[in-house]
Amino acid sequence: MKLVLYLVPILAVTVFFLIRAEFRKTQRQIYVLKPISTLFVIAVALLSFGQTPMNLTYTVGVLVGLVLSLGGDVALMFQSNRKAFMVGLVLFLLAHVTYAITFALLDPAHAGDWFPALVMFLIGASFYVLIHDGLGTMRGPVIVYIVIISVMVVLAISTFTGSALTPRQAWLVSLGAILFYISDVILAANRFWKPFKYHRVSLTFYYAGQCLIALAASYFA
């Protein structure tokens, strides 16, 4: 078994205690467990440097996205502050842009991508209509965010029809992108539509998605 896979159960444990801390609102534990969990995901990507073969473009792209996500994680720990929330939003937006560029560099968009693009457009448009009334001055930034993350998911799914990634990697990347998308939808729905008592379960989707994208770096054939 690949060494990188031993980090997955450790990550699962830290995320479990992070979610428990979120429900209990024990801020000190959150301040420790959240960045540590993201650092474990970064370690998953870093371990691909010990794999043969590896793809420098993919690994570096994912690492840049994860470092931006780490910054976003730290900022969103203080999301009750509007400035901190905006910083987190921008950093995660840049992380999605980085992932999208990385996927596109490895496997440019294909003609067949129109169908997932249409599906993501319909999902994004429907979700925007749902949260529209609660956005206020955030309408512009949220529209941009929905577009960017939708493009990222489409480009991730596009790896199935390319040749740069193996089928296993395409599954890892696509599922990872979709789970990341779901985590953001849960957070946005909680903030702009209806408060959801258990919205912190979004962390399960978030870390699972990031971990799958990072794991793909160790499976180049």
Image: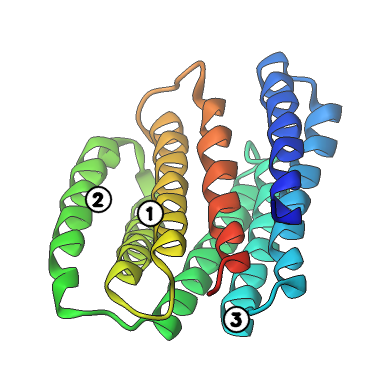
In front of the other: label 2 or label 1? 2
Q: Which mark is residue 55?
A: 3
Residue at 63% of width from left, 41% of height from top?
A: 79
Residue in the foreground of this view, choosing between 59 and 162: 162
Rendering quarter of residue 154: bottom left
Labels 1 and 3: the sequence-earlier one: 3
Labels 2 and 3: the sequence-earlier one: 3
Q: Position of residue 27 (x, y in %)?
A: 80, 27
- Dot 2 corresponds to which residue? 124
Q: How many marks?
A: 3
As shown in the figure, which amino acid type bears the numbered disc 3? Answer: Asn
Q: Is 128 situated above or below 174?
A: above
Labels 1 and 3 touching (C-beta < 8 A): no
Q: Which mark is residue 142?
A: 1
Gap in angstroms between the C-alphas marked 2 and 1: 10 Å
Q: Is 123 situated above or below 100?
A: above
Q: Position of residue 61 (x, y in %)?
A: 59, 76
Element at label 1: helix
Q: Is 76 situated above or below 48?
A: above
Labels 2 and 3 touching (C-beta < 8 A): no
Rendering quarter of residue 8: top right
Labels 2 and 1 touching (C-beta < 8 A): no
Residue at 33% of width from left, 83% of height from top?
A: 108
Left or right position of 71 against 169: right
Q: Position of residue 114 (x, y in %)?
A: 14, 69
